[in-house]
Image: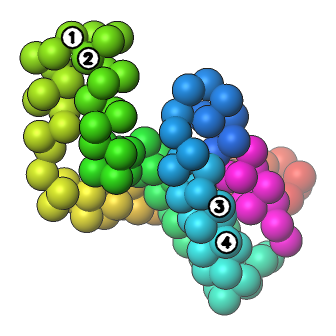
Amino acid sequence: PFALFIFTAILGFFMMLMGQSAVMPIHTLIIAVLAELVRKAFGYKTVKGSIAGYAVMSLWTCGDFWPIFILKDQYYALTEKMIGAEYATQLVSLPIWIMPILYVSALAGGILGGLLGAKVLKKHFAKAGLV
């Protein structure tokens, strides 16, 4: 219990230390709580619970995009200074409907990654008698 929460929370705070806005750790903490709740609902010691929890945990990466919509002016100023006005204009003109696509893609990637991990675990470690 709480392994996903700790790992995900640490990621969010490291991202903020590396220059992300405060939106990132807040988003990451919300995702960490959801991941733990999903993992608990499916069972901490089940493969389904691990895959489902990992899939929800994968949603933390979507937090990178929220500042574009929430802190548009600040994000534009920072991006313009670092990369240029043309790129900044294109970036802040992203439509908000891109967010559900990002969340679904991240969730699907998390599920596929979890399934792959379970298959590798079963193939190599279970055969060797380590699990």
Q: Which residue is mark 1?
A: 84
> Camera-side residue: 114 or 56?
56
List x then y, in percent, for residue 46: 72, 77
Identify the residue at image location x=26%, y=17%.
80
Identify the residue at image location x=28%, y=50%.
69
Cα–Cα span, label 3 and label 2? 29 Å
- Tell me, for residue 33, which label it has, or none: 4
Cα–Cα span, label 3 and label 1? 32 Å
Q: Which residue is mark 3?
A: 29
Q: Is the residue marked by circle 4 packed among few (<14), some (14-19), or many (20+) residues within 10 Å?
A: some
Q: Are marks 3 and 4 in contact (CB under 8 Å)?
A: yes
- Tell me, for residue 80, which label it has, or none: 2
Identify the mark nearer the N-term, 3 or 2.
Answer: 3
Amino acid type indicated by mark 4: Val
Q: Secondary structure at mark 1?
A: loop
Cα–Cα span, label 1 and label 4? 37 Å
Identify the mark nearer the N-term, 2 or 4.
Answer: 4
Q: Are marks 1 and 2 in contact (CB under 8 Å)?
A: yes
Q: Are marks 2 and 4 in contact (CB under 8 Å)?
A: no
List x then y, in percent, for residue 98: 19, 54
- What is the magenta range? 1-10
- Tell me, for residue 129, which label it has, or none: none
